Amino acid sequence: MTLLTIDWSLIIEKLVLIAVVVLGSLVVALYSTYAERKVAAFMQDRLGPNRAGPFGLLQPLADGAKFFFKEDVIPVLANKWLFILGPTIAMSAALMTSAVVPWGNHIEIGGRIISLQIADINIGVLYVFGVVGMGVYGIMIGGWASNNKFSLLAALRGASQVISYELPMGICMITLIMLSGSLSLKDKVEQQMSSGHLWNIVYQPLGFVIFLICAFAECNRTPFDLAEAENELNMGYHQEYSSMKLGFYLFAEYINMLISSAVIVTLFFGGYDIPFLDESKLNPNTAAILGIIALMAKVVFFIFLFMWVRWTIPRFRYDQLMNLGWKKLLPLALINMLVTAAVILWLHK
Amino acid sequence: MSATEIIFWILSVLALVSGLMVIFSKNPVYSVLWLISLFFAISGHYILMNAQFLAIVNIIVYAGAIMVLFLFVIMLMNLSATAEPKKKVWMKFTGVISGGLLLWILLSVVRSSIDMRGKIAEVKTGDIGLVENLGKVLFTEYAVPFEICSVLFLSAMVGAVVIGKKEE
C-alpha cells in the first residue's frame, strides 16, 4: 500500500536549503554581535573585544557559551509556559522570513536546477508582513508573562510601535508592487535585473527612506529602541530573562536586522544583481555564486548602517516616535503612493 | 490517504481544539492565544484551497493586528480568573439554549442553501483565491459592493476618531 507519494529529492533539496539558510543566518547574526561591538568601539575611539582569538574573533562563541552556562531563572510569579513561549516566538518569527528572500539565482547540479530561494510564493511581500506581525507576539507574551510592570509597559510600547510603523511600510510596499506588478520577491529582483530597468531606488528614493526608517522601528533598533529603554524601563521587556532565553531575544534582534537588510536590498537595490554586468552570459553556477556574494556585500553594508545609526543618533522620546510615524511618515508615504500611481498611469496611457 | 488529506485532518483537529480552548480557558490571555492558533489553522485551510492571498491577509489582519489589540486591552485590564464575577445558573442555562439555537439555524441554512448544494471545495485546483484573479473580480464584477465596503470602513474610522478625541 502506498500511503504517500512524495518527491523525495525535492524534500531533501528544500531541507538542505533551509538548513543552510538558517545556519547562515545564525552565523551572520553571531558575528553581527561582534561587528556591533567593534563598530561601537571604532566610533568611540576604543579597541573593542580583542582578547578571545585573533582580533577577538572568538568573542561571539565565548559569549554564546556564557549564555548557555548561566543559571536559567524563571521568576516564581511568572507564567511559566508563556515565559518560555515568548523567546521561542521571537526567534522563530525572525528566522521564518528568510524563506521568501531570494538569496541568489538558480544553480545546476547534475542537470537538476535548484533555485536558491526556499519558497517562491506569489504573495512573498505579504508573507514578510505576516511574519513581522507575528514577531510582536514574542515581545508581548514575554513582557506579560514576566509579571513585571516594566516588562509589561515595554512590551506594550514595542507592540504599538511595530503596529504603527507597519502602516507606512506597507504603503511603500504597495508603491513597489505597483511598479513591478507582482508580489513575488523573485519577480521583483528579475525585473530590476532586466535590461532597460534600473534599481527601484532610482524610481522610489522617498519610498526607500520611509521604508528604511520603518525597518529601524520594526527591528526595535536605536533610535527607536523604546521597548528596551534602560533609563526609564530598566531593561525593557526582557528584564526578567536570563541565560539563553535572554540570548534568544538579543539574537532575534540581530537576525531581524539581517533579514530586513536582505529585504531592503531585494526591494530597492536589485537583490543579487551585480551592477554593470550581464549575468546571463556567465555560466549559471558562477553567476549564482557571484550573485550571492553581491547580495551579501549589500546586506553587510546595511547591517553596518544599522550599527552606524545606533552609535550616532540618540533615542527618540515616545511621543516623538508616534508623531513621526503617524503624522509625518504615513502622509508622506500616501503622497508618494498617489504620485507614483499617477505617473504610472500617465506613462502607460 | 494523500498528503492533502492528512494536512486537512491535522488542520481541522487543530482548528476545533483551538476553538474549544478559546471557550474553556479560564485565563483570557490564553483564550486570545488559542484564537490566534485558530486563525492559523483556518489560514492553512485557505492554502489547501489554493487561496494564498486570503490566507496571508487573514494572518496579517486578524492574527497580526486585531488580536494584538485584543491582547493589549486584556493585558492592561489585568483580568484574572478569580476577579471575574460568577454568573448565575439560569444565565448560563439561557446562554446555552440561545447559543444552541443559533448553531441549529446556521447549520440548517448551510445545509439547505441552494448555492452550497452539491458543491465541494476545490482542493489545490481552484485559482480564484490568487491575488490576480481576486483583484480582477473585485474591481470589475463586484466594484460597487467593494467601494461601498470601503466607504463603510471610512465612516467607522471617522467614528473611532470622533469617539477617541478628547473634549476640548
Image: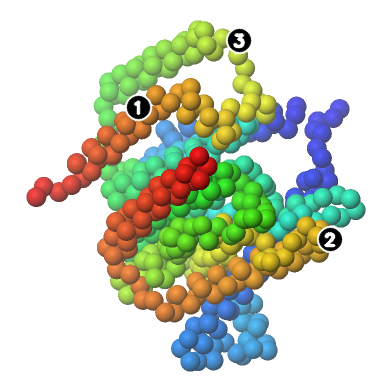
Question: Mark 2 belongs to which subunit?
Answer: A
Residue drawn at 49 percent across, 9 percent down: B113
Task: Sort mark 3 into few (<14), some (14-19) or many (20+) by Cα contacts within 10 Å.
Answer: few
| Applied colour scheme | rainbow
Q: Quadrant of residue B150?
A: top left
The percent coordinates of residue B22 (x first, y second) are 44, 35
Report the mark closest to the observer, 3 or 1.
1
Residue drawn at 55 percent across, 54 percent down: A93
C-alpha span from label 2 to label 1: 54 Å
**Residue at mark 3 shares a chain with residue at mark 1:** yes
Q: Is residue A165 above or below residue B4?
A: below
Question: Mark 3 belongs to which subunit?
Answer: B
C-alpha span from label 3 to label 2: 54 Å
- The total of numbered circles placed on residues is 3
Residue on which the image places disc 2: A283
Q: Is residue B139 above or below residue A161?
A: above
The percent coordinates of residue A253 (x first, y second) are 51, 65
Q: What's under tag 3, amino acid-wise?
A: Gly
Residue on which the image places disc 3: B118
Q: Is residue B28 above or below residue A4?
A: below
Q: What's under tag 2, amino acid-wise?
A: Asn
Residue on which the image places disc 1: B148
**Residue at mark 2 shares a chain with residue at mark 1:** no
Q: Quadrant of residue A97?
A: bottom right
Tell whether A238 sits left or right of A22. left
Report the mark closest to the observer, 3 or 2.
2
Residue A141 in view of the camera: no
Residue drawn at 72 percent across, 65 percent down: A277
